[in-house]
Amino acid sequence: MDTTEEQPGGIERRMVHRLLTLWRDARGEGPMPTLAAVLAQDLADILPDMYVIALPPGGGEPTFERLGPAIAEEIAADLVGEPLSAVPEGCLLKQALECVGEVVDRKVPMTRGGEFTNTRGQTILFRGIIAPLGDDAGSMRYLLGAANCKVVDAAA
Amino acid sequence: MTRTVSYEIYTQRSEGWFIDSVHDDKNHALFEARKLLESPRQTAIKVVEEKYDDETDKTISTTIFNEERGVVRDRPKNYRPEQKPDLFPRDAVERTKKDDTDFVGYLVKMVLVIGGICLALIGAGMLYMNFVGG
């Protein structure tokens, strides 16, 4: 049996697949979709785990444009308008943002996952995706991200 | 020694292969590739495994998936799918239309020429009858 025919395992992989599919649908024939085109899609189940990063037109450090409630709740702070460096260590968002530079360089969606230890000493499995968003002229203006995780059961 | 592995999905367009997305998980990349191949917009998909060795500073690329819609193959990484034969090439269609037009023109000319000759013969016959009769 070819397991790759099945839905990717775990809620975190399903979310990544769904966001990537929505991103592709919104993109059409262009290199990347606009933020408006993505937000026009049915994102209801992804919104809590989603975030949007604004890329300053003249360079400089990107800042958070939107943060889903699940992401914001984990870091217990409202980082909208704040730079990426404001994200605290030991949280899901910090791990998820590790491929931001590569997405900006390559201008293609990237998915990554892994394991980390959070501030409470729990081992966390996570998976995330970051995809580029453009403006009407095709220049990259935002990054769309989503990430979720689960605590690894110590008894498992 | 650290080895970084990533899986790049490429889609084929008329201009060549274009990168679609990059994944750190092989099964997820293969899943996405198969899903993409189901899309009516895609004709061919491949997944390239990129292994970077920081000790040697070299990247080894291996194509681990390469499929066209309805065709399963195992091909080398630098393979470029051959052009499919166009069953209805535009120039052939235009040529056929041109041939049709030429043929109609030829028929018209032939009718006019034969008609002309017949008329001339009839005229000549009538003159001859006048001479003989007169």
Image (cartoon, helix red, strand yellow):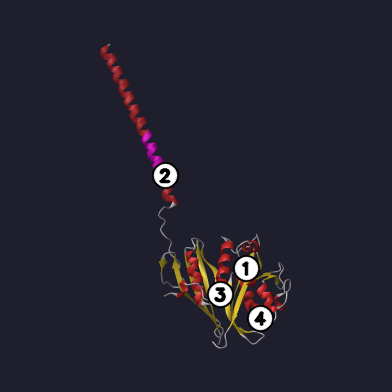
Label 2: which secondary element: helix
Q: Residues within 10 Å of mark 4 (few under 14, many from 20)?
A: some
Q: Is residue A70 magenta?
A: no
Q: Which residue is mark 2?
A: B97
Tag in front: 2 or 3: 3
Tag in front: 1 or 4: 4
Q: In the orientation shown, which residue stands out farthest toward the left?
A: B132
Tag in front: 1 or 2: 1
Kindly indicate whether the residue at mark 3 contacts the one at mark 2 (C-beta within 8 angstroms): no
Distance in Å between CA atoms under marks 2 and 3: 58 Å
| Residue B77 in view, yes or no | no
Distance in Å between CA atoms under marks 1 and 3: 23 Å
Q: Is residue B107 magenta?
A: yes
Q: Which residue is mark 3?
A: A11
Residue range (magenta): B98-108
Q: Residues within 10 Å of mark 3 (few under 14, many from 20)?
A: some
Distance in Å between CA atoms under marks 1 and 2: 48 Å
Residue A132: mark in rendering: 1
Q: Residue at x 44, y 51 (%)?
A: B90
Left or right: residue B56 versus residue A139 is left
Kindly indicate whether the residue at mark 2 contacts the one at mark 1 (C-beta within 8 angstroms): no
